[in-house]
């Protein structure tokens, strides 16, 4: 019988908001004896109620000091986008392995600093694209490789979500492209629906920077924000295929995001939050399947025990970061005219903006690999979209 391993000490930077999910996951793994919450890095310490179930972890607003005092082996970073680079570099300097929330950085240059620091420190890093832990990814790629849908023609993704106006006031950086001269890039493609972009690239097998040949964007916003809330990206890979994503936070009827692999003899649809796959192909009835998912912190722990390779190492998100860079350097998103949207109030009294017809446009984009301008959206003028695309494509692909 193998000797019992001691729980791995973990520090969590950012334990509120989305970080609460990581805190709950750490609690799950702690109950299994795999980890121990050694510290919490928050500017305002968590209350005893927030830490219910944990045994008084050390708390500090200084990640470096916390790593030094606790000896934590893993730093889990779930903080505002513009803080990711400094905190990741701090973890590397202290020899801590890293689980870094998506997007890993607000620019390709900062992403490169993180990857270089991790390589120099000889530590492991995992990027928090949970959808890439889905077992459906491998299953779909096997189907494509086996010719189940014929030749792969392209990948289209659709994300029709809704966020109320309070969502863009949840933090000082929310809805910003930059804040006090610092890049944030909190747009629909780069943050809330970043999984759609990363998952589409993964299904195409185009995850590295060198897999990307060109990127074109169409960026718009209906809300009174600086960043984009309704956007389209068209990625040409070095294989010659196209990967497209249409996304909005202004849906009329919000639904589950999905990715479609288009083949010459059928298609495969993947609802990545549900791990659900639908195969439709010539000469066969539709086949639906559900798949398991490997938690990324579980996988990182397995990797440190030499029992698994990392599912989402930084290099596998470099293509996604090329998209982030394209969005970052593109002209500012175009505001939609007032006639393109209207306000809606939900049962709880939350007010949000709804773009007329956007649900159908997002679905049509995933089905045809066309952008909003090509689909005839009246607010997506060809001249504005082309200008944004030309500027964004050049800067995004060539950034390093």
Image (cartoon, rainbow, N blue to C red):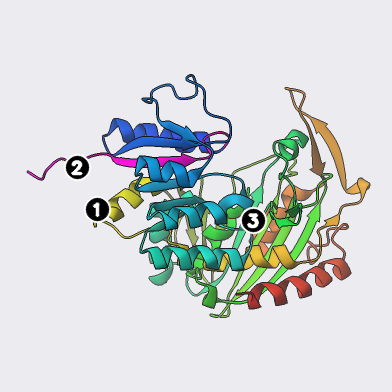
Q: Residue at x 46, y 55 (%)?
A: 285
Q: Residue at x 27, y 34 (%)?
A: 32
* Residue annotated with mark 2: 5
How far apart, in angstroms, are the residues tagged by discs 1 and 3?
Answer: 32 Å
Q: Is residue 26 above or below residue 51?
A: below
Q: Is residue 381 left or right of residue 317?
A: right
Which segment is the magenta one? Answer: 1-17
Q: Residue at x 41, y 45 (%)?
A: 67
* Residue density around tag 3, few if under 14, some if 14–19, many if 20 or more, within 10 Å: many
Magenta span dominant secondary structure: loop
Spot occupied by residue 335 in the image (x, y as percentages of width and height):
87, 53
Q: Quadrant of the C terminus?
A: bottom right
* Residue annotated with mark 3: 190
Mark found first going from the N terminus, 3 or 2: 2
Q: Is residue 309 above or below residue 188?
A: below
**Quadrant in which residue 55 is drawn:** top left
Mark found first going from the N terminus, 1 or 3: 3
How far apart, in angstroms, are the residues tagged by discs 1 and 2?
Answer: 10 Å
Numbered disc in front, either 1 or 3: 1
The mark total stands at 3
Spot occupied by residue 251 in the image (x, y as percentages of width and height):
73, 43
How far apart, in angstroms, are the residues tagged by discs 3 and 2?
Answer: 38 Å
Residue nearest the observer in this picture, 353 or 139:
353
Inspect this view and state whether residue 295 appears.
Answer: no
Q: Is residue 285 above or below residue 392?
A: above
Mark found first going from the N terminus, 1 or 2: 2
Spot occupied by residue 152 in the image (x, y as percentages of width and height):
51, 72
* Residue annotated with mark 1: 305
């Amino acid at each position: 019988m193998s000797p019992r391993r001691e729980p791995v000490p973990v520090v969590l930077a950012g334990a509120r908001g989305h970080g609460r999910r990581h805190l709950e996951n750490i609690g799950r793994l702690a109950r299994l004896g795999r980890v121990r919450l050694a510290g919490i890095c928050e500017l305002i310490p968590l209350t005893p109620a927030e830490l219910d179930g944990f045994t008084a972890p050390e708390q500090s607003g200084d990640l470096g000091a916390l790593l030094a005092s606790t000896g934590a082996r893993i730093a889990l970073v779930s903080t505002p986008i513009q803080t990711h680079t400094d905190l990741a570099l701090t973890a590397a300097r202290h020899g801590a392995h890293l689980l870094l929330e998506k997007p890993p950085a607000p620019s390709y240059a900062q992403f490169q600093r993180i990857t270089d620091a991790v390589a120099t420190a000889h530590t492991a890093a995992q990027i928090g694209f949970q959808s890439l832990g889905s077992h459906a990814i491998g299953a779909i790629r096997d189907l494509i490789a086996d010719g189940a849908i014929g030749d792969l023609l392209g990948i289209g993704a659709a994300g029709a979500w809704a966020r109320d106006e309070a969502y863009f006031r949840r933090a000082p950086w929310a809805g910003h492209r930059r804040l006090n001269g610092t890049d944030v890039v909190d747009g629909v493609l780069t943050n809330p629906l970043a999984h759609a972009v990363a998952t589409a690239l993964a299904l195409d097998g185009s995850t590295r920077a060198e897999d990307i040949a060109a990127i074109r964007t169409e960026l718009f916003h209906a809300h009174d924000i600086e960043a984009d809330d309704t956007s389209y990206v068209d990625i040409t890979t070095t294989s010659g295929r196209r990967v497209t994503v249409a996304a909005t936070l202004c849906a009329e009827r919000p639904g589950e995001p999905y990715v479609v692999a288009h083949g010459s003899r059928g298609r495969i649809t993947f609802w990545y939050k549900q791990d659900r796959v639908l195969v439709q192909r010539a000469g066969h009835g539709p086949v639906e399947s559900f798949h398991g998912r490997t938690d990324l912190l579980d996988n990182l722990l397995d990797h440190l025990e030499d029992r698994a390779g990392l599912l989402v190492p930084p290099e596998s998100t470099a293509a996604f970061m090329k998209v982030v860079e394209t969005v970052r350097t593109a002209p500012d998103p175009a505001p939609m005219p007032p006639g393109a949207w209207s306000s809606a109030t939900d049962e709880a009294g939350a007010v949000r903006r709804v773009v007329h017809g956007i649900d159908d446009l997002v679905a049509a984009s995933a089905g045809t690999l066309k952008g909003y301008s090509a689909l005839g959206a009246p607010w997506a003028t060809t001249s504005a979209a082309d200008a944004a695309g030309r500027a964004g494509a050049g800067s995004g692909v060539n950034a390093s």
